[in-house]
Image: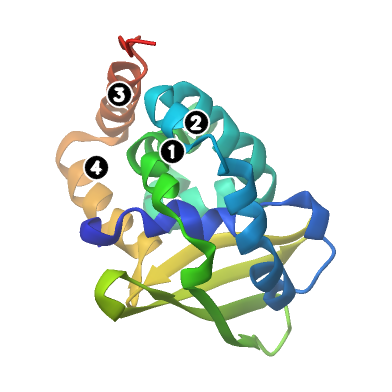
Amino acid sequence: MKALAWLLPVAFLAWGLPAVAECSPHEVIRSTAGDVARLLDGRRDYLRRHPDELYALISEVLLPHFDLRYSSYLVLGKQHWRAASKEQRDRFVQAFYQFLVRNYATGLLDFNPGTLAVLDDESSPDRKRHVVHTEMRMDGGRIVPIDYRLRRTGDGWRVYDVRIQGVSYVQNYRSQFAAEIDALGLDAVIARLESEIRAQTQPQSTGG
């Protein structure tokens, strides 16, 4: 999944524009790919040199439409989530989100909306969950399937997981963190994430 890391922010951001917040999940995907590109139009090189502004842009567009707490709960898993204190949960939620933004943000700058094709979609029997199937055409013509998973909340549809070539980002990180938590404890995992975030937030010389 790391080789396709740039697809992850594209997947999330395709849900993130409030102008289409009242649309069905399928319509949101279909209509927002071009809007994401317009947000970046003429600014890609600048944002590549000023990552903090890219992080802020992603948070502005993504965070209101991303089910951050539920996604973090799934990543930790029921056992570790229930064992954690409220402070630990809150710290993990924020640290995990900032970790995702900083590790995947620059991949968004390579997004070409013409490479995304929206296919079919399906709902759970109670219609509280939804999956939209899409395909991304990579350089060389290779097709990568991407599934967006959402759940209905009091504030509308929120994305909580993305599957790229059948690999769930939630399950991928849950496997990584579970072993680390079992060995070192949740506080150590949170501290590592926060340390990596601080390291990536250090001022950089851009030459302009």
Q: Looking at the image, is mark 2 or mark 4 nearer the viewer?
A: 2
Q: Earlier in the sequence, mark 3 or mark 2?
A: 2
Residue to which mark 4 is pinned = 181
The vertical placement of 139 against 4, above or below, is: below
User: What kind of element bears circle 2?
Assistant: helix
The vertical placement of 119 against 64, above or below, is: below
Residue 191's label in the rendered image is: 3
Q: Residues within 10 Å of mark 1 (few under 14, many from 20)?
A: many
Q: Earlier in the sequence, mark 1 or mark 4?
A: 1
Q: Looking at the image, is mark 1 or mark 3 nearer the viewer?
A: 1
Residue 49 quadrant: top left
Q: CA distance from mark 1 to mark 3?
A: 17 Å
Residue 203 appears left or right of 140? right
Residue nearest the observer in this picture, 195 or 140:
140
Residue nearest the observer in this picture, 86 or 142:
142
Q: Earlier in the sequence, mark 2 or mark 4?
A: 2
Q: Residue furthest right?
A: 22
Asked if the residues shown at circle 2 and circle 4 are in contact, with their CB atoms under 8 angstroms apart, the answer is no
Residue to which mark 1 is pinned = 101
**Which amino acid type corresponds to the residue marked 4 in the rendered image?**
Ile
User: What kind of element bears circle 1?
Assistant: helix
Q: Position of residue 1 (x, y in %)?
A: 25, 62
Q: Looking at the image, is mark 3 or mark 2 nearer the viewer?
A: 2
Q: CA distance from mark 1 to mark 4?
A: 22 Å
Q: Earlier in the sequence, mark 2 or mark 1?
A: 2
The vertical placement of 22 against 108, above or below, is: below
Asked if the residues shown at circle 1 and circle 4 are in contact, with their CB atoms under 8 angstroms apart, the answer is no
**Which amino acid type corresponds to the residue marked 2 in the rendered image?**
Tyr
Asked if the residues shown at circle 2 and circle 1 are in contact, with their CB atoms under 8 angstroms apart, the answer is yes
Q: Residues within 10 Å of mark 2 (few under 14, many from 20)?
A: some
Q: Looking at the image, is mark 3 or mark 4 nearer the viewer?
A: 3
